[in-house]
Amino acid sequence: MMHAEGHHEVRVRQEGKLIDMTTRFVTAVGSWSRRPSIGVIVTAVLLALVWVADYASGPSINLSIAYFAPIIYAAWAIGRNFALVVALVSEMPTYIDQTMFIRAGSQSTLAGMSTIIVRLLVYLFVVYVTSALIARSAELKRESATIISINKELRTSVLQLEEDLRIAGELQESVMEFLPPNVPGCEVGAGIRHSRPVGGDFADAGLRDGRVYICVADISGKGVPAALFSVLLKHLLMNAIRERKPLPDLISDLDSGLSERLPADRFVTLFYAEVDPQTGIVEYVNAGHLEGVVCRCKTGEIELAGPTQPLLGLSGIAGGNAPSRLQLERGDVLAVYTDGATESKTTTGERLGEDMVRGLLVENTHLRSQEMVDRVLAVIESRTEKSLRDDLTLVCAKRTDAVSAPASPRLQS
């Protein structure tokens, strides 16, 4: 296979060289043939050949159209004025023939003059049409050269933009790296899939006052702006966690910080939960985000953790309502995801929908958290078209057996 690909590349290069050489040859010949001295000589030769052919054929054969060749060439090689002279000269044989016919009495003066005038008008028409076509062709060449130049600049700009986006994606991935805490009693897994090199989905997890916190958010919009705001959210969240405030105040600080910095048309949906790894008690706040899904291990049923307050980042809408509670038993999973899981489209244009995603979660509850996340995301990606896929994030917190005290967290407040 590699040998065949190498042979194909060699052949493509050879064909490219041949085309380039042919183009250069045609360009050189065209440039040479349009020199004034060469143009006059070639025009004279063409005109002489037509004269000879016209004389040799006699009056029985009309070679008027043959005079188009020197006329058109003269217009192309030298210009319209010279072509007009060639048109007048081309009419000389006709003038001589018609004069002889009139003197011999075989044709009237009116008929002879009409023939001369009609042929001359046709030649002049050919001159003007040819000149107009040549002028338009030159104009198109200039426009084509301009377009080619602009395309090169655009191509360079696109390549630079793609490189900038790649670097921005790597930087975002580094800054937003998800490092779940290693805590007996609660196991966290996560997966983030951006539809572009950068995206607006956010996920984080860690320890706060001995409890495991998970945070999933979706910044409105896509691309670089949403990615920048996700970094802002990370900064605000870390500051709020370090200050060790109660959960309602933590959410209120996030809302205030986002409202001060986000444009008026931007907002954030957020699901924040804290899990006690010893008791399985979960306190959560759902700020306009999709419902969290609690998968019950024993019964195979699901419970939903719906919105508890408005979304964040809109001035005048205060956050910080009292958190809601739920209980995780051994083997139960709290799954939180962004709308990319449900709104990504299949090849037929249909959205996946809530039922399909929730069914996948229930089917894979028996797996470990990270395995569950990987399996669900793999199925979603296999069923959706990449070009129709939105940013997608899934975080799963699973209640496990607590056999020892919590390990050292990534971020200890």
Image: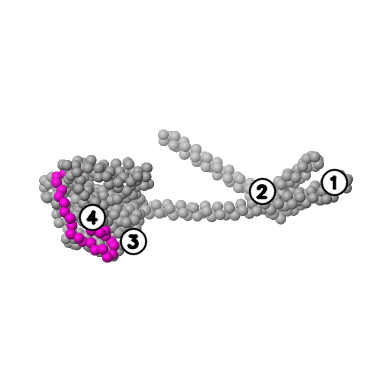
Disc 2 element? helix
Q: Nearer the viewer, mark 1 or mark 4?
A: 4
> Marks 4 and 2: in contact by CB < 8 Å?
no
What amino acid does circle 1 point to? Gln
- Give the Cα distance between marks 2 and 4: 80 Å
Residue sitting at 88 percent across and 45 percent down?
104
The answer to whether residue 47 is magenta is no
In the picture of the structure, the residue carrying the numbered disc 3 is 265
Q: Residues within 10 Å of mark 4 (few under 14, many from 20)?
A: many
* Cα gap from disc 3 to disc 4, whole angstroms: 21 Å
Q: Earlier in the sequence, mark 3 or mark 4?
A: 3
Mark toward the start of the polypeptide (2 vs 3): 2
Whether label 3 touches label 4, CB < 8 Å: no
Rendered image: mark on residue 33: 2
Of circles 2 and 3, which is in front? Answer: 3
| Quarter occupied by the N terminus | top left
Give coordinates of residue 239: x percent, y percent: 22, 61
Measure the alpha-carbon separation of dots 1 and 4. 104 Å
Three-letter code, disc 3: Asp
Judge left or right: residue 132 versus residue 316. Answer: right
* Render colour scheme: one colour
Callout 3: SS: loop
- Alpha-carbon neighbours of circle 3 within 10 Å: few (<14), some, or many (≥20)? few
Number of the label disc, if any, that sits on residue 307: 4
